[in-house]
Amino acid sequence: MGRIFVSAGSEEFAGVHLGAGTALAAGSELPELMTLRDGVVAELRSRGLAVVTVPDDLAMPQVIQWINGRDRSGDVAVNLHIATHINPAFRGTSVYYIANNAERKQQAELLLLALTRRLPELSIRGALPDTQAVLGRLPYCRQVLPASLYVELGFMTNGGDRALLQNHQRAIGVGLADGLVAWSQMVAAAATAKRLDLSQLTAATRDMATPIAINLNGRIYGEQGIFINGNACVPIDLVERLGIALRPTASHRRTTYGHVVYLKAIDLRDYEIAVHWDAATQTIQLQTLLPAGHTVHPLAGRGQTSEVQLLMFLKSQNETGLAQFPEIARLYRDEGLNERINYDIAFAQMCVETDFLRFGGVQKPTQHNFGGLGAVNGAPEGATFSSTRLGVRAHIQHLKAYANLEPLREEVVDPRFHLVARGVAPALEDLEGRWSATSHYSDRVLAVLRQLYETAQLL
């Protein structure tokens, strides 16, 4: 068997949609998390497992670099995390894996099963692809060289989760150890079965690479990809032919095989490419229904979705919220079209600000404040509007204030419209640090926007 890397806490966000103004506590500051981590490590070592504990004082990029610098074939890596949420009712345990990797999903489910066997009282949110994380991706799942999983043990802001995390640490630690042992054995067996001559592989390429077909917009592409370590990869030449200039700041893992450079297909999702894996035909399916390679997302313009598509997306996330505000999809389309503001972006932002209409913080549903707009008098709960339509209209108007210099087509209802430097933030990415001080705010809205487009089959 290989070694098990165990890290705890990070500045990385996992899968909970936090409301405006929520403080994102670093898990490394939680004594419960450190105690759980130490218990897992002690339990694994008592069973004779080789465990490597990652230093606590490293940020996530450093954690990834630290693990990758020590990776050997057959190793696995797990990051433990305890989250917070603006809504104290939100709870549950989940394990995140790299999207489109059926093998890693199975391993995440194995870990959850082991946990629930030891502590059935846990509320399980499930094994989730990292595309459902706040930022639409988890670097820990994508960039760590060994097989890796990101475990969100629960929420300290929920009384039920907090009681379990504080009072049943032994059971949680043993359950995690059970799952990690089974997972490590599975990976080690697969690594042994797939031994091969490594002369043509880079140090990062540990498992057998098998050829796969690439379906691009309904047609088979002339060059094949490879399937390695449970992930589909495409040649870098295809990426460039799609007009995608990989962002210099993006930490996408590249692999060299047979003197060709490959990129994980799932990372193309960051550039408006829909990525699906067809296991039956061993084909990676790529779709570019929207212009590929977007680097910015203008606030001004027209949305792509229909009212029904907006409704179905919201229903899939929170059916109760849709029942409370049944006209909200139509109102966002109407108000967005009227002011020539992209209503898809506005709708996605509403989902982030209200946690898909769950609210749960100081802001109440009766305020009809769907954009998290502040009040001019500095009231902590923010602005209040008399109806759903006026709340949506104020949100659209505030976006227009940032987007351009065009006059409004309706009477001003946004209390802060005249306080904005008009046209200072024409794109979603420009709202970072302006609309909210929360880290990666624009990325969080963009992650929801991509989920919306995927649900509507536009991406």
Image (cartoon, grey):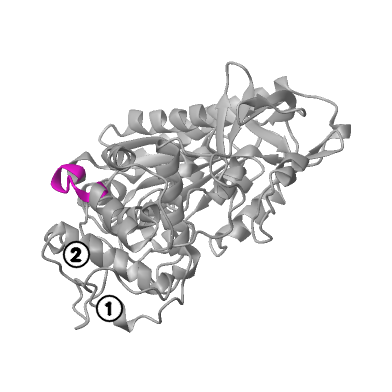
Disc 1 marks a residue whose amino acid type is Arg
Q: Is residue 325 magenta?
A: yes
Regarding mark 1 in the picture, which secondary structure is present there?
Answer: loop
Classify residue 315 as left or right of residue 176: left
Residue 361 vertical placement versus 317 (above, below): below
Q: Is residue 142 magenta?
A: no
Residue 126 vertical placement versus 393 (above, below): above
Disc 2 marks a residue whose amino acid type is Gln
Rendered location of residue 187, percent (x, y): 62, 28
Asked whether the beta carbons under mark 2 and mark 1 sit within 8 Å of each other, the answer is: no
Rendered location of residue 24, percent (x, y): 38, 63
- Crowding at dot 1, Cα within 10 Å, few <14 / some 14-19 / many 20+, comes out as some
Nearer to us of marks 2 and 1 is 1
Query: Which stretch appears magenta?
Result: 322-329
* Residue at the image position 24 percent from the left and 69 percent from the top: 410
Classify residue 147 as left or right of residue 435: right
Name the image quarter holding residue 226. Answer: top right
Which residue is more in the foreground, 122 or 318? 318
**Label for residue 363?**
2
Label 2 to label 1: alpha-carbon separation: 17 Å
Look at mark 1 in the image and give the residue it sits on. 416
